[in-house]
Amino acid sequence: MQALTRLVAILELVAETSGPAAPVEIAQKVDLPLSTVTRLMRQLADEDLLFRTAGGAYMLGSRIFSLASVGLAGIDFVEVVRPTLTALRDQSGETTSLHVLRGTQRVCVAEVQSDRQVRRIIPPGTINGLCGTATGEVLLAHASEAEVDAAAEVAGLDAAERSALDARLAQIRTRGYAINDHFGDDLTGVSTPLRSGSAAIAAISISGPSGRFGHAVAARFAETLLKEAEALSRRLARPGHPVLN
């Protein structure tokens, strides 16, 4: 049990750290030799429970998010949002989804699929990166500077690409939504945040094949998406409503 206790302690400390956590920092907090902590963190990374950055620090890994998403899919928060996802699906004819930020990735926690034969499919539990997608960058636009730095490092952005990312994030903060029609499989997405106060607790998105749901069509639904997200954020802020932390 001692080994399990050590592993759990390391995971908890990494989760509590703003940005990547260095082994030396974790070793000091758990009062263990640096060599022991380094070995344990490498083992956790081998199991995808931690992610090792290029600089040798660690963040929570994709397997943690995948396991967590199973529980998230059943929480009250998702059920509060689902009617809005369904209404947006019915209005747009395209798949709608709800995503949360977890480290340097985003996790889909709810989806309402389009009824059309050719459609976007993004099952709950799906994990994607943040940079270069509408949903990911909506979440990044309201994240901390350390989180943006970490996401850019994981994506391998050079100086010019990082500058372009910062410009996009500033634009998202100004207009309240993001549209991206340059990601895989000829898909276009439009996304906006759900808020708790000034913080973004999730992102709500509409996405579909670019052939029928291109940039111009997505832009027409952006205002509707904003209004629905703002109304939903107000409902979630009322006493008694669940908020995803």
Image (cartoon, rainbow, N blue to C red):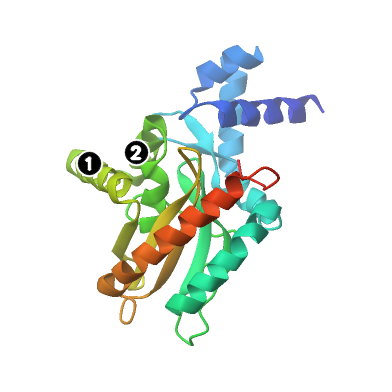
Compared across the picture, whether 36 is left or right of 204 comes to right
Q: Which residue is mark 1?
A: 158
* Place of residue 194 in the rendered image (x, y in percent of width and height, measured from the top left): 49, 50
Disc 1 packing (10 Å; few <14; some 14–19; many ≥20): few
Compared across the picture, whether 243 is left or right of 51 comes to right
Viewer-proximal residue among 135 and 171? 171
* Place of residue 79 in the rendered image (x, y in percent of width and height, measured from the top left): 67, 60
Viewer-proximal residue among 105 and 7? 105
**Is residue 209 in view?**
yes
Q: Image quadrant for the C terminus?
A: top right
Give the Cα separation between the discs numbered 2 and 1: 9 Å
Compared across the picture, whether 163 is left or right of 173 comes to left
Viewer-proximal residue among 208 and 4? 208
Residue 153: which numbered mark, if any?
2
* Place of residue 179 in the rendered image (x, y in percent of width and height, measured from the top left): 31, 61
Q: Secondary structure at mark 2?
A: helix
- Amino acid type of disc 1? Asp
- Amino acid type of disc 2? Glu
Q: Are marks 2 and 1 in contact (CB under 8 Å)?
A: no
